[in-house]
């Protein structure tokens, strides 16, 4: 293991210490458990958008605006339309 120091707000430290005592384990063990759990949740999230694009393929949509690639921000976020180039 690698020793790492972090700063915690006093209230959070108190809550973690109470939890560790209740579980009859160390404060470090409780923190490692939470970090591992939180990391796994982050890794499970698709940040690439690959799943979203695959779901678009499944609906087999046809047609749509002819200027979609030029005005993607307009159609996704409501931004102003660009003039044709």
Image (cartoon, rainbow, N blue to C red):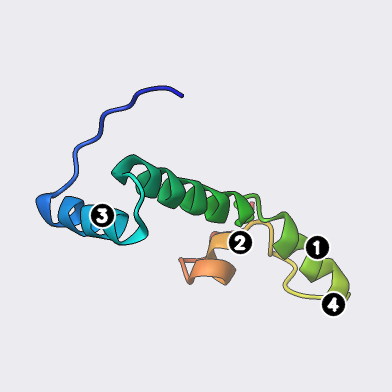
Dot 3 falls on a residue whose secondary structure is helix
Q: Which residue is mark 4?
A: 59
Instruction: Check contact, mark 3 vs mark 4: CB within 8 A.
Output: no
Q: Which of marks 1 and 2 precedes in the sequence?
A: 1
Query: Mark 2 — residue?
Result: 72
Question: Residue 29: which numbered mark, if any?
Answer: none
Label 1 near label 2: C-beta < 8 Å? Answer: no
* Residue situated in front as seen by the camera: 31 or 18: 18
Given residues 73 and 14, the one toward you in this image is: 14
Which badge, 1 or 4, comes first in the chain's sequence? 1
Query: Residue placed at 19% from the left, 44% from the top?
Result: 8
Q: Which residue is mark 1?
A: 54
Q: Which callout, 3 or 4, points to the residue nearer the camera?
A: 3
* Residue at the (85%, 67%) spot, across then down: 57
Placement of 28 over or under 75, stated as above or below: above
Outermost residue to the left: 10
Does label 1 or label 3 sit earlier along the sequence?
3
Question: Which residue is at the front of the view, 23 or 27?
Answer: 23
Q: Quadrant of residue 69?
A: bottom right
Tag 3 or tag 2, which sits nearer the N-term?
3
Q: Position of residue 23 (x, y in %)?
A: 36, 59
Front position among marks 1 and 3: 3
Q: CA distance from mark 4 to mark 2?
A: 19 Å
Label 1 to label 4: alpha-carbon separation: 9 Å
Q: Earlier in the sequence, mark 3 or mark 4?
A: 3
Mark 2 touches mark 3? (CB < 8 Å): no
Disc 1 element:
helix
Question: What residue is at 64 percent from the left and 56 percent from the top?
Answer: 70
* Residue that mark 3 sits on: 16
Q: Quadrant of residue 54?
A: bottom right
């Amino acid at each position: 293991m690698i020793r790492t120091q972090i700063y915690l707000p006093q209230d959070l430290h108190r809550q973690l210490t109470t939890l560790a005592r209740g579980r009859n384990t160390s404060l470090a063990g409780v923190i490692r458990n939470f970090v591992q759990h939180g990391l796994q949740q982050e890794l499970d999230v698709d940040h690439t958008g690959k799943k979203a694009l695959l779901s678009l393929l499944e609906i087999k949509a046809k047609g749509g605006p002819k200027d979609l690639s030029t005005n993607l921000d307009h159609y996704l976020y409501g931004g102003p339309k660009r003039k044709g180039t």
